[in-house]
Image: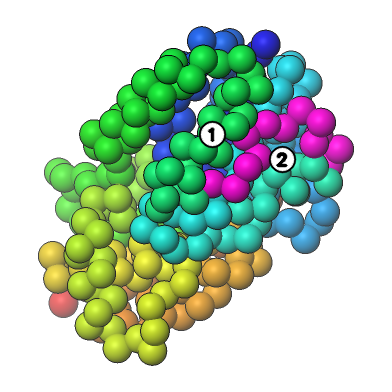
Amino acid sequence: MRVGVPKAYFYYAYKPFVESFCQGLGIQVEFSGDTDQEILERGNRVCVDEACLPVKVMCGHVKKLADSCDAVALPRIMRTEFGESICPKVAGAADLAAASEMDKKLIFTEPLYLDDRKKLEKALWKQCKKLGIRRLDFKVNFLNALLSQEMAERGLDEEGYRYKVFLAGHCYNIYDPFVNMDLIEKLHRMDIGVVTEERVTRQEKDSGLAYADLMKKPYWSFFVNNFGSMRALRKKGIDGVLYLSSFSCGTDSFTVEMLKKNLNGMPFFVLKLDEQRGEAGFDTRLEAFAELLKGRSRQ
């Protein structure tokens, strides 16, 4: 059996676990490869027009794998390892793909609660058992994958550039160079380095939230990672914040507003991403942000 794994959604957040777990199953695994125009067009054909760019990219990866694999692994993540919820479109990835008539090949669609190791192991074993994986082999592989995720150094914290900005947003926008049109490379050419939320500890994020006078504990994982990290990094002397947001993203609508109100005059820039691939306007806005950083530095 050939099992396909799409490089989309939370693949970028849990890449060490995913790759270690898949490679240790003893079955043939095929990754969908980097996003390109063909994958985006596949996703556009099977998605409704109102879907955001990450949804269309995800469906494009699944469609590509469905054409060449016997099954496609598409996990249904319900909660992160710290108990927060994620975007309903990410949690409902299997349902979105099923609506595109690809549901017959989808596997690993059981709900995954990453904050409960027993539930996580049970859900993954349920599918592995159907694939003919031995229990002992699964157990060893599962533990190795957890260790790989824990030990991996994730995220970016770049030195050697004149400016450093907090690159905020969702992981599948930040680490997919096709989706963000090689944003990080363009920032480097402007002498701008980036730091991402993975380089901020959970304790630092919680401390940033604790002093924000919020009415209650945040519900969304994306809000905790971006808002908490921004408040923590602000004390470390970053030069600005650049937020990558998908057009029509619901969770970003309030995350961006909360960031604006807590920046204390720090340069803040929001880049909206959609399936339009014209780079002229994108580059012009980046150059304007770079000029803003230079102006603030002179002051």
Q: Quadrant location of the N terminus? A: top right
* Image quarter of residue 258: bottom left
What is the secondary structure assignment of the residue under circle 2?
A: helix
Image position, residue 176 (x, y; %)? 50, 40
**Which residue in the structure is indicated by mark 2?**
59
Q: Which residues are magenta?
A: 100-112
Q: Residue at x 61, y 65 (%)?
A: 249
Q: Is residue 93 magenta?
A: no
- Position of residue 34 in the picture relative to residue 23 (left or right): right
Name the side, left or right, on which 105 lies relative to 165: right
| Residue found farthest to the right | 101
In this view, the residue in front, 246 or 222, is 222
**Cα distance, mark 2 to mark 1?**
22 Å
Q: Earlier in the sequence, mark 2 or mark 1?
A: 2
Q: Residue at x 46, y 80 (%)?
A: 257
Amino acid carrying label 2: it is Cys
In x, y percent, where is residue 283? Answer: 49, 53
**Amino acid type, label 1:** Leu
Between 37 and 228, which is closer to the camera in this rendering? 228
Q: Is residue 165 above or below residue 153?
A: below
> Is 47 situated left or right of 178 in this image?
right
Query: Badge 2: how crowded within 10 Å, few (<14), some, or many (20+)?
Result: many
Where residue 154 sits: x, y (%)? 29, 40
- What quarter of the picture does the C terminus occupy? bottom left
Find numbered disc 1 in the image and state the secondary structure of the residue it sits on: helix
Q: Residue at x 40, y 44 (%)?
A: 117
Q: Which residue is mark 1?
A: 124
